[in-house]
Structure formats: structure tokens, C-alpha cells
Image (tube, rainbow, N blue to C red):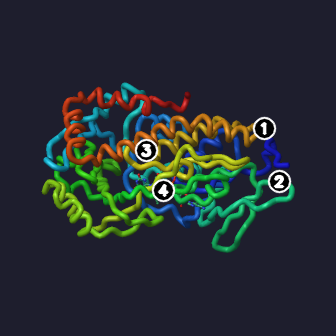
Amino acid sequence: MTQDGDVQHPIVIAGAGIGGLAAALALAQQGHRIVLMDRARQLSEVGAGLQLSPNACSALDRLGVLDALKPVVCAPDSLRIWSGRSGRQLGRVQLGSFIEQRHGYPFWVVHRADLQRILLDKVRETPGITLRLGAEVLDLAPSPYEHLVCIYQDENETGNLHCRALIGADGVWSKTRKIVPRHQNAHFSGQVAYRATIPIDKVAPRWTRDSGLWLHSNSHLVHYPVRGDRELNVVALAEEAWQDETWSAKADKEALLHRFKDWPSDVRNLLRLPETWLKWALCSVDALGPWTHGHVALMGDAAHAMLPYMAQGAAMAIEDAIVLARHLPGDVKNIPAALRAFERSRKPRVSHIQSIAFRNARVFHYTGVPALARDTVLRLSKPARMTARFDGIYSWTADQ
Ligand SMILES: Cc1cc2nc3c(=O)[nH]c(=O)nc-3n(C[C@H](O)[C@H](O)[C@H](O)COP(=O)(O)OP(=O)(O)OC[C@H]3O[C@@H](n4cnc5c(N)ncnc54)[C@H](O)[C@@H]3O)c2cc1C
């Protein structure tokens, strides 16, 4: 029988992305030994901006990385919402000190690579965590003695590792998901995100003061500063049939400009600035599908990848890590029951936020009369009231 109380074997985490690194730290805080594997040989600079709302910052504080993040994050005063048709401002969500006073934690924006590096530095200095890069988790081996044996592939061999539990933090195109019966596959949304970063001294001040969200028919644009105000992160989202399982496919700038041909000229000039645009296909995984099976649990995008229209994908992965560790104290006796309890406690919140992201995906891209009605509501809404609409999401803390 698998010995749940037996601390001889480690917990294996598949994936050293944002969720896997956070889970390694949170589980190590509970006294577990961790083997953290990532198929990438090195955790590279791929990626661009992520938003860290107060709930994410509370979790990062628990992991002990909040101070290390301060030099590389930005804290915009507002999110300004603009019409991509007229170029006029439609509304404003108050962030900055307003949101920090309201929730006790700031609203930050960060480059994914900076967040990953800082979590990685913390992992490297934390006793009890072994990091294995270039090691891809493939499956569980059938074991006549019901030992949990994880199969992985590194550059030398296909190896076996006995473990107490396997945590699948291997992202939207997860392999470990297939271990969980009746799992849901990633579903392509029909939308593609083009992203680039631009040195801040190359753009006019109007782009860098606040975060921006621009709405147009079947497309929208998001921008905010990252890397301690040294770069502007720009993401342009549009409907497109292209699908690919990577984060860094090279995008055709001319095709992007063509898609945004009826946008205001200053937006088009901004889109002309980056030499290189990358793109990724927006996919989701139904959060209501199963996350656990025996000693295996999925978390983060592997369990519930969401469209980026509520900017909570990374936050949910980091929250998962805290709640997972809470259900797995070092002396846990029944790991399958603990993992099921983790799934039960997270699902309502995560599926609710996923459904808001789906709704926003429709609302952001409205055309015709619904777009006019949306714009009118935005114009009439007070900035503080707009912020308060998200209290239920942002008020989560690691102590709950
Ligand atoms: C390279 C990259 C760039 C990204 N860029 C952006 C961005 O610009 N903006 C944005 O909003 N979101 C981006 N994301 C997604 C964002 O990080 C996630 O939505 C969110 O942080 C949830 O994180 P996660 O840990 O669940 O998954 P991820 O952050 O996707 O991490 C998954 C990790 O698992 C590893 N992995 C995959 N399969 C295996 C396997 N079988 N065995 C071992 N390791 C495996 C991957 O190499 C990766 O490091 C990016 C993700 C990646 C991997």
C-alpha cells in the first residue's frame, strides 16, 4: 500500500512555472520533501506581463517573496478603459493606494520572467526542494504494490521515481492531466494574443502612466509597464483560427496591423514599434472537470486554464499552491482525502472566476448596440465603484 504517513519519499511536482514553483515553496513550508521537475532545460525569459492583484500578493507574501518583487513590479494608479473605435476614454478602475488600502495588499503588474526568477531564487535557497530541469513527467508506472511511481524522461534516460503524491502543475497543455480519469482537454477559444514589450523610452508618456484596456469589435488591447517601469507590455487580442501549443510562436506584424486597421492611428503607431511580436492561442480547461485521482492532483492551468479576460490565471495558480499546502500538513495521514478536500475547497471560486473571464470575453468584443450599451454603462460608472465590483476576487487572503 502507498504509505501516506511515510515521509521517506518526496512529493513530485510536474512543472516549475508560476504554480509549480509556488507549490514547491508552500509544501516545503509544511515540511515536505519536494522534487520539482520541469521539461525545460532552463527557465527562459519567454512570456510577458502578468497582473498580481491583492489576492495574489497576499499569497506571495506567505511565500516570502513580496519584498524581492518590489524592484521589478509596477503599481499603476488606474486601469483606464478606452474605446478602440473613437479613441475616447470610457471609464476608469481605481488601483494604486486606493486598492492597497481597501485590501491590505497592492495591485502590481510584473513580467512573467521576473516573477518566475524570484520564485526560482527562493526555491533554490529553500532546504528540502530538489529542482530538476530538463526532466519531463510522463506518467505513473503500474505498480503491483500500489507504490506511486512517477515516470519521467530526462536527456539521459527514462527514469522512475517513488513518490508520496504527484502534483500536476504542468500548464494548459498538461501531460499529467491524462492520469486523471474523465479529465477535460484544453479547449481553443478561437482567439489569439499577440504580445510584445517595448523599451519605455521609445513610447509617449500617455502609454506609461496607467494600465490601459482598449475595446473594439472582436478585438481588444491591453498595456501596462513592467520590469520596474523599464518596458511597456502590450497584448493585442483578436479572433483568429490559428492554434499552436507554444507560448512563443513568431507573429506576423503586418497581419497584426491589418487586423487593427480601423483602430486610432496612435494605437497603430504603438503596434508598429516592436521589432518582434509573439503570439499564443488562448485556451481554457473547464474548471468543473476532475482535478484529482488518488495521490495525484492538478493545479493551476493544468486544472483550470482560463482566458486572460479577468487577468487571474497566475493569481489562481498561486492561490492553489497556498490552499494545497494547507490541506497537506507535513504529518498528513490520508493524502487522497486531503487532495479531494483541496479540490472541493478551490473549485467554486476558480470556476466562478473562470466564468467571469468567459463573460468578459464576450463583453469586451461586443459590436453594435450591445457595444454602445456597454460603453454607456462604463461612462456612467464611478472609478471606486468599478474597483468595488471585484472585491470578491481581490479580498481573498492566504490566511482564510
Ligand atoms: C513560457 C511561458 C510563457 C508564458 N507567458 C505568459 C504571458 O506572457 N502572459 C500570460 O498571461 N501568461 C503567460 N503564461 C501562462 C501563465 O504563466 C499561466 O497562465 C499562469 O501563470 C498559471 O501558471 P501554471 O504554473 O499553472 O502554468 P505555466 O506557468 O504555464 O507553467 C507550466 C510549466 O510546466 C512545464 N511543463 C509542461 N509539461 C511538463 C511535463 N510533462 N513535465 C514537467 N514540466 C512540464 C512547462 O515547461 C512550464 O514551465 C506563460 C506560460 C509559459 C509556460
Q: Is residue 272 left or right of residue 305?
A: left
Q: Residues within 10 Å of mark 2 (few under 14, many from 20)?
A: few
Q: Earlier in the sequence, mark 1 or mark 2?
A: 2
Q: Which residue has dot 4 on it?
A: 187
Whether residue 391 can be seen here = yes
Label 4 amino acid?
His
Expressed as whole percent of the image width and height from the top left, the position of residue 374 reads: 24, 38
- Mark 1 near mark 2, Cβ–Cβ under 8 Å? no
Label 2 amino acid?
Glu
Residue drawn at (55%, 65%), measured in percent from left and top? Answer: 40
Q: Which residue has dot 3 on it?
A: 69
Return the mark for residue 333: 1
Q: Earlier in the sequence, mark 3 or mark 1?
A: 3
Q: Secondary structure at mark 1?
A: loop
Decide: is 234 above or below 275. Answer: above
Q: Residues within 10 Å of mark 1 (few under 14, many from 20)?
A: some
Q: Secondary structure at mark 4?
A: strand
Instruction: Please identify the quarter of the rendering in which residue 200 is found.
Output: bottom left
Expressed as whole percent of the image width and height from the top left, the position of residue 249 reads: 40, 68
Nearest the eye: 235 or 36? 235
Alpha carbons under labels 3 and 2: distance apart: 42 Å
Pair 1/4: label in front = 4
Pair 3/1: label in front = 1
Q: Earlier in the sequence, mark 1 or mark 4?
A: 4
Label 3 amino acid?
Leu
